[in-house]
């Protein structure tokens, strides 16, 4: 299967700081990337969808000014959590998809964010 | 709106026995269905998908799933469970317009030696 990486795998930051998470498709070009959030012992919730070269589409209830997404190339998308607060602590997972709707989404290993 | 239900929070099975993890879905139109597995503190690994064609889909690690349109189900199965299969399993349906996945609540599979 295709490989998607995320960096960092774990980050601890102080409240009020910003954190950037990178998502890369290593062996394929991802026309679309997705960002999910997972709370402990819960399912994944879609935060936003990003297409290369265009603005991300955010799900209802997700603050676009707080969770900045940039899909700069066909292999890289970044999620920046701005002015992080303890309630932003979570497991953030990206996925990447090439081609059309029939194509599989491949997931990164996730980034655990802890805001103190 | 589309949705996926996984009615069991946990499934326990003895090693070597067959396993089934249940999933039912609700969509308008033709469903694109997926199964993923998640190990602790890890991302999701793709197991298999149903887009069209044969109702029995074979995937990774010996898993298979049966698409049943009349029962709107997509249960995950394996003939002989391994201890290493113990993990969290997610069923998902794709919104073909947005291409986003809607996940079920997950089922924890515990395979006892």
Image (spheres, coloured by chain):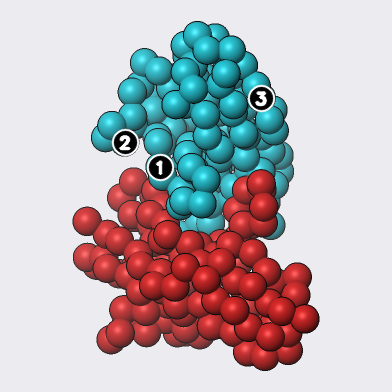
Q: Quadrant of the C terminus of chain A?
A: top right
- Give A113 or A97, whichever is nearer the viewer: A113
Q: Give me the residue at 42% from left, 59% from top.
A: B105
Residue B16, compared with residue A27, is above or below; it is below
Chain cyan in the figure, letter: A
**Where is residue A14 drawn, in percent x and y?**
58, 12
Q: Is residue A46 left or right of residue A72?
A: left
For the residues carrying marks 1 and 3, which lies nearer the camera in this image?
3
As helix, strand or loop, the secondary structure at mark 1 comes to strand
| Residues at marks 2 and 1 touching, judged by CB atoms closer than 8 Å | yes
- Give B74 or A50, whichever is nearer the viewer: B74
Task: Please identify the quarter of the rendering in which residue A59 is found.
Answer: top left
Q: Colour of chain B?
A: red
Task: Please identify the quarter of the rendering in which residue A21 is found.
Answer: top right
Q: Earlier in the sequence, mark 2 or mark 3?
A: 3
**Where is residue B99 drawn, in percent x and y?**
39, 49
Task: Please identify the quarter of the rendering in which residue A27 is found.
Answer: top right
- Give B93 or A50, whichever is nearer the viewer: B93
For the residues labelled 1 and 3, the Cα–Cα distance comes to 21 Å
| Residues at marks 1 and 3 touching, judged by CB atoms closer than 8 Å | no
Q: Are marks 2 and 3 on the same chain?
A: yes
Query: Which of the numbered marks, if any, corresponds to residue A11?
Result: 3
| Location of mark 1 (residue) | A46
């Amino acid at each position: 299967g295709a490989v998607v990486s995320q960096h960092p795998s774990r980050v601890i930051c102080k409240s009020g700081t910003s954190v950037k998470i990178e998502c890369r498709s290593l062996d394929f070009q991802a026309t679309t990337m997705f960002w999910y959030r997972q709370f402990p012992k819960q399912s994944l919730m879609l935060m936003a969808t990003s297409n290369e070269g265009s603005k991300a589409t955010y799900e209802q209830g997700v603050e676009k000014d707080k969770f900045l997404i940039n899909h700069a190339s066909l292999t890289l998308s970044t999620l920046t959590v701005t002015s992080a607060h303890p309630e932003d602590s979570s497991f953030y997972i990206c996925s990447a998809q090439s081609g059309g709707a029939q194509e599989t989404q491949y997931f990164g290993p996730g980034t655990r964010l802890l805001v103190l | 709106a589309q949705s996926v239900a996984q009615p069991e929070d946990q499934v326990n099975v003895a090693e070597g026995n067959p396993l089934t993890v249940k999933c039912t879905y609700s969509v308008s139109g033709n469903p694109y269905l997926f199964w993923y597995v998640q190990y602790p503190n890890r991302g999701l690994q793709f197991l298999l998908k149903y887009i069209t064609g044969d109702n029995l889909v074979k995937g990774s690690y010996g898993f298979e799933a049966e698409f049943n349109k009349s029962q709107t189900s997509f249960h995950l199965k394996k003939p002989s469970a391994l201890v290493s299969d113990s993990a969290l399993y997610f069923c998902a349906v794709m919104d073909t317009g947005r291409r986003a996945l809607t996940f079920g609540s997950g089922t924890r599979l515990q395979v006892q030696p």
